[in-house]
Image: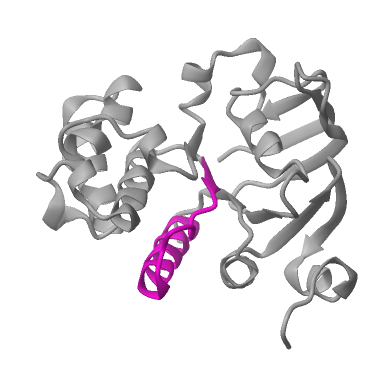
Amino acid sequence: MIPLALEEVSFTYPSGVTALREISLTVAPGESVALIGQNGSGKTTLARHLNGLLQPSSGRVMIGDWDTRQHTVAKLAARVGYVFQHPEHQIFKRSVQDEVAFGPRNLGFAPARVAQLVEQALQATQLSTVADQHPHDLLPALRKRVALASVLAMDTPVVVLDEPTTGQDAQGVRAIGEIVERVRAGGRTIITISHDIDFCADHCSRLIVLGGGRVLLDGPRETVFAHGEFWSRPP
């Protein structure tokens, strides 16, 4: 397992909007961390620095001993799996099984290992019964789990979940939560971007509150929740 580190990271979009301002933080191997904050606070911008989709304007991002500026997105995908908020952005195969197998195949795993990883991911996400179906024939809530399974099958030490409960009913939220707990139990690092405070409270031991591109609060969930000035949460 590998640590993550952001060292005085700032980022400005080509439009001139500065989304991150001198952010420094570390995430230990096996931590389950939530990035929370209002729209425009910098959550997704920060997360997309972890797999190289964005590169800092200044500062650096370290994934273990890898500086993201020195590695391609394809290479970083072996260390950081990213589940996008909208699953249609990463689903393009004709069956659930082929979709889940795509990642580990492209990472160069042997066929037997690919088969094992696919089976494990389908079981973990409770998708084995729809393995032969076209992903786009499934309900949106299930498509989200297909995207999650495709990332889990890549066996990355770090998994980033962008708004995992969006579009899920209560049963779907519980299912996603159960999957997250299984991934945590396996020792992987999980970074969750979410507006769902209850989900974060249940499944993330550390909360990082962003605002205006800066870290406003960072600590154990109990400590962060004690700062009521950042949100109104029922007792």
Residue at the (71%, 49%) spot, across then down: 39
Let me know if residue 181 is in the magenta part: yes
Q: Position of residue 87 (x, y in %)?
A: 39, 42
Q: Position of residue 180 (x, y in %)?
A: 46, 60
Between 58 and 230, the one lying in front of the other is 230
Give the residues in magenta.
Answer: 158-184
Q: Quadrant of the N terminus?
A: top right
Could you tell me if residue 108 is visible in this image?
A: no
Count of numbered marks: 0
Give left or right: position of 200 versus 122.
right
Let me know if residue 198 is in the magenta part: no
Q: Quadrant of residue 152?
A: top left
* In this view, 6 is above or below 75: below
Q: Quadrant of residue 31?
A: bottom right
Could you tell me if residue 110 is visible in this image?
A: yes
Residue at the (71%, 45%) spot, across then down: 27
